[in-house]
Image (spheres, rainbow, N blue to C red):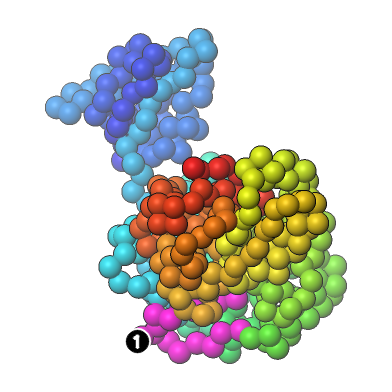
């Protein structure tokens, strides 16, 4: 394996020393370079002896000395991540509507993405060489979708092409000082109740180097034709899960077991305070988002009020069903401090994915435009999480289209209420 150079930054060391676009990096200081992580790890020394290969397969050597403040400036080719080889009964991607952007149907299951981006992996497609690389390069922590410590039940739920004993792999890596964040997607009738108790008990082994355990409810869309029949959580079921998790935290005197925010919303229970979540290790898993939002709202409220007064007029906050209670509380708090302005809140129900999907990140353009009545007199306040890195909603529309649709300015707010920007 080797790594191809996609581009070179102007004024960089790579340009100065003659590395060219489409060169292939064979090795650095005698170490084979396979991907972006190898490049990052092994290109930080003072003296870098490159073995390069051009498009005609001619090899050459050059040595770069990193004695200046210049960056190396090598942009490698796009990494080809490993794909998921499972057929999980609860897979969210399998429940996506047809004819959407192709990238939305990609199932990655790559240990490098787990380390770099915090993506959850299943361990079912790791080779022994990759396991040893994790150890050798201290690729830690890893984020693991475990779901159950019972290997037979796990295989029943994940229907892996190559069944593996995930706990055995975790134990092997833990013995070699690799740490883990664990995800459990809880599916009623499968890995809940006694099986959840068993899984948590197994994970409480201190030698496993578990940093956090996130327990999230299965997400079920309206697009499940031909898929395994599964039951969503309701208020009573969510209450029982919370009771069980709190009992497990107490039994093992452990503060690393975290239920998802959605359980508290479904059970109509108060969201725990900031200290419950420590440093929010599973924030991207929907765990602690409401608590952090509440904390940040209080911190930035004065600056937000100044922004709202400067904009003038009334405001309409659009949010998900799960966040309505919190957003309504924010609005009432702000309204007490605004003299002639008013803030209202409207829930945007997820008709695109179905009634059981209640988070802001899955709100679509069509949900907003079909439910918010035109003409709108207020400035819209919208969570930025409905847009991806390319600035598009899940159904492929951008912020400017939304603004033009309502002919109103939009205050785009960070999902954790840390920042905002007015789009006019």
Residue 164 placement (x, y as % from top left): 47, 71
The quarter of the image holding the N terminus is: top left
- Residue 18, by quadrant, is top left
- The reply to whether residue 143 is in sight is no
Residue positioned 70% across, 69% down in the render: 325
- Residue 79, by quadrant, is top left
- Residue 107, by quadrant, is bottom left
- Nearest the viewer among 316 and 181 is 316
CA neighbours of label 1 inside 10 A, class few (<14), some (14 to 19), many (20+):
few
Give the main secondary structure, helix, strand or loop, of the magenta stretch. Answer: loop
Q: Say if 160 sits above or below 177 in the image.
A: below
Residue 251 placement (x, y as % from top left): 84, 75
Residue 378 placement (x, y as % from top left): 57, 56
Residue positioned 38% across, 39% down in the render: 35
The total number of labels drawn is: 1
Drawn side of residue 46 relative to residue 58, left or right: right
Drawn side of residue 238 relative to residue 163, left or right: right
């Amino acid at each position: 394996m080797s790594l191809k150079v996609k581009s070179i930054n102007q004024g960089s060391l790579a340009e100065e020393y003659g590395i060219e676009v489409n060169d292939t990096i064979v090795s650095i200081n005698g170490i084979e370079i396979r991907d972006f992580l190898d490049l990052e790890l092994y290109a930080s020394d003072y003296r870098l002896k490159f073995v390069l290969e051009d498009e005609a397969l001619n090899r050459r050597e050059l040595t770069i000395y990193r004695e200046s403040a210049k960056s190396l400036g090598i942009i490698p080719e796009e990494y080809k991540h490993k794909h998921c080889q499972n057929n999980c009964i609860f897979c969210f991607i399998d429940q996506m509507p047809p004819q959407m952007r192709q990238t939305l149907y990609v199932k990655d299951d790559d240990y490098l993405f787990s380390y770099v981006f915090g993506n959850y992996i299943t361990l079912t497609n790791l080779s022994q060489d990759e396991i040893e690389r994790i150890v050798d390069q201290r690729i830690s922590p890893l984020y693991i979708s475990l779901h159950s410590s019972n290997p037979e039940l796990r295989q029943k739920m994940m229907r892996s092409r190559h069944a593996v004993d995930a706990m055995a792999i975790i134990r092997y890596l833990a013995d070699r000082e690799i740490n883990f964040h664990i995800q459990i997607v809880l599916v009623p009738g499968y890995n809940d109740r006694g099986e959840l108790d068993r899984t948590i008990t197994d994970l409480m082994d201190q030698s496993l180097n578990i940093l956090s355990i996130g327990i999230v409810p299965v997400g079920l869309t309206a697009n499940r034709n031909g898929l395994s029949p599964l039951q969503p959580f309701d208020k009573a079921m969510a209450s029982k899960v919370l009771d069980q998790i709190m009992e497990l935290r107490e039994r093992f005197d452990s503060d690393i077991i975290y239920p998802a925010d959605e359980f508290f919303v479904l059970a109509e229970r108060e969201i725990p305070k900031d200290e419950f979540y420590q440093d929010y290790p599973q924030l991207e898993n929907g765990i602690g988002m409401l608590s952090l939002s509440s904390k940040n709202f209080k911190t930035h409220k004065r600056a937000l009020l100044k922004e709202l007064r400067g904009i003038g007029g009334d405001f309409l906050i659009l949010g998900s069903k799960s966040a309505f209670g919190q957003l309504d509380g924010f609005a009432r708090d702000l309204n007490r401090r605004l003299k002639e302005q008013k803030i209202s809140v409207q829930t945007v129900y997820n008709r695109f994915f179905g009634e059981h999907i209640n988070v802001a990140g899955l709100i679509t353009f069509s949900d907003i435009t079909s439910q918010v009545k035109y003409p709108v007199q207020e400035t819209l306040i919208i969570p930025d999480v409905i847009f991806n890195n390319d600035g598009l909603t899940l159904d492929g529309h951008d912020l400017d289209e939304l603004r033009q649709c309502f002919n109103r300015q939009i205050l785009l707010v960070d999902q954790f209420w840390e920042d905002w920007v007015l789009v006019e």
